[in-house]
Image: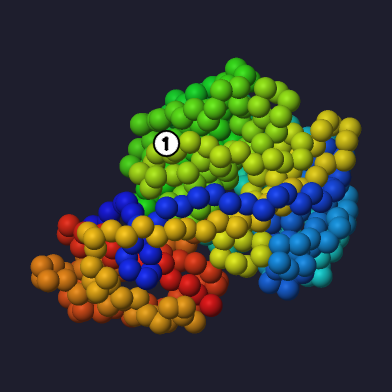
Amino acid sequence: MKSRLFTLLFLAGLQPLVAQFCFQPRVAYPVGTNPSSLCHADFNGDSITDLAVANRAGTVSVLLGKGAGVFDTSTYFQVGYLPYSITAADFNNDSLTDLATANLGPWDVSVIFGNGAGGFGTDTSAFGVSSPKAMVTADFNRDGNADLAVTHYGLVEVALGNGAGGFAAPLSVAVGSPVSALTTADFNGDTIPDLAAVGASSVAILLGNGLGGFGGVNSFAIDTSPLSIISVDLTHDGKADLVTCNMKNNITGNISVLLGTGSFATVTNYSINSSVVPRALCSADFDGDGNVDLALAVVRGNTVPFVSLIPGDGLGGFGAPTLLDVDSFPNSIISTDFNKDGKPDLAVVSVYSNINTGFVDVLLNCSTTTAIPDAGFNNSDLLVYPNPTNGKFRVNYSDNSGHYVQSIAVYNLLGETVNDLNETLSASYTDIDLSQVSRGIYFVKVQLADKTYTQKICKE
C-alpha cells in the first residue's frame, strides 16, 4: 500500500518545511541562429553535464560544462536545415553519447556520432520523415538499442535502432490531429515504454507491446493548442502523470494535468496568470519540499518573456506562480543539476527573432527551506543514519501503537522512485543501499497504516 507524500519533514526533528523558490540571476550563453530545442548529457566523459542546442540555421551548438554550473563557449556542428528538435543517446553502442535531430528542411532525422571528447562527426541522414517535429528516444522493442519516435502530421513514426547507428524503416501509428509534442514513459505498469502524443486539443496514449509496435490509441480531451507535454509522477503513487502547456487563444494560456490513475480521463486545467502564454515546460522539485514543481517558459502580453515556477502540492494540484527573467522569447526549457549541489537547475533556449543569434539562459537553484516546529511528531519515531551517507544507511522506526511498516520508498528531487520496499516489514529497522545512484538529496518515506513519515538524506 502506498500513500501520497503529504508533508516533508526536516531531519533534525521531523518538522514540516516552508519552501521557497530561489534562483540566481540568469547567465546567458550565445548559441546559433534561431535556436529551437535543447538537451543535456555528458558529451566528453568528465561526469559534468553538457548542453546541446538545435539551431534552425542547420547547426547544433555544444556547450561543454566546466563545473560549478559554468559552460564553455559554443562549438558548432552541421546538421540538416531547420532542425525542430534534438535528443541524445548512444545510437551505435560505443558507450559514447550521440545526437539526433528532426530536420524540417530535408524532411529527415539525422544523427551525429560523438567522439567522447565533446566533438561530433559528420551529419548522417538516418531515415526520412515528412515534416518531422517532436522526437523522443527509448528502447521500444527491448533489444538494448536506442530507438526513435518522431511526429509527422497526424502520425507518430517509430524507427527501431540496430545498435550500429542505423535504423529500420519507420513504422507509422495514426493518432488523428497533427501532433505538436511527444513524451515517453510506462503508463500501464508493464515496464514497456509507451508514448503520449499531443494533438490540437487532446492527448493520445499509445501503449507499447515490447516489440516496437503499439496498440490501439486512447485519446483524452485537454485544452486547445498545446505546445509541450511532460510525464512525471506528481502524486508519489509510482504512476506516470501528464502535464501539457496550452496556448489556447495565444492571449491567456494554461496547463492541463492528467493524473495516471489507470486512466487519464480526469483532466484539470490550471490558469498560470492573465495574458501569459506558455511555450514549453519541465519539472523537478525546485523548492526542496519533496513535491514535484513545474517550470514553464512563458511570454506575457506577446512581449515580455519569463520562466514561471509553479509549486506542486504532492496531490496533483499547484499553487501561485513565481516569475523569473530570461533573455528573450523562450522556445525550450530543461532541468537538471548543473553544479552538483543536489538542487535542480534550469536552462532555457531563447531568441528575439528567427534571424537573430539565440541564447541559453542558465539559472542555478539557490533554494533553502525553513523548519517550523510541530508538536504532532515525535523526534524519536524515525531515525535515518548515517546521514550524510556514502550509499548504505539504516532506517530505524519505533512506534508505540505496534503497527508494522508497510513500505519504505526513496525518492529523488524529480519525484522519481529510486528504491521501493513494498512489503510488510516486521523488524524495527531496514538497511538500504543507494550506492548505485548519483550523489545529491533524496527523501525517505516510511508508510504505516495510518501515518506517513518522511526524512531527507544526503548521498555523498
Whole-percent x, y for residue 57 in the image: 87, 39
The residue at the far left in this view is: 401
Q: Kindly identify the residue that appears in the image at 72 percent across and 41 percent down.
A: 326
Q: Kindly identify the residue that appears in the image at 40 percent across and 39 percent down.
A: 317
Above or below residue 191? Residue 406 is: below
Above or below residue 434? Residue 271 is: above
Above or below residue 97? Residue 36 is: above
Q: Say what secondary structure mark 1 lies in.
A: strand
Q: Does residue 240 appear anywhere in the picture?
A: no
Viewer-nearest residue: 75 or 178:
75
Task: Left or right? Give the position of 425 relative to 301.
Answer: left
Circle 1 is placed at which residue position?
A: 258
Q: Does residue 136 appear anywhere in the picture?
A: yes
Assess disc 1: are there few (<14), some (14-19) or many (≥20) residues with their C-alpha within 10 Å of its C-alpha: many
**Quadrant of res 296:** top right
Amino acid carrying label 1: it is Leu
Whole-percent x, y for residue 447 in the image: 25, 62
Q: Kindly identify the residue that appears in the image at 37 percent across and 80 percent down.
A: 385
Task: Left or right? Give the position of 296 relative to 391.
Answer: right
Viewer-nearest residue: 9 or 36:
9
**Quadrant of res 247:** top right
Viewer-nearest residue: 271 or 201:
271
Whole-percent x, y for residue 392 in the image: 42, 82
Whole-percent x, y for residue 338 in the image: 66, 61
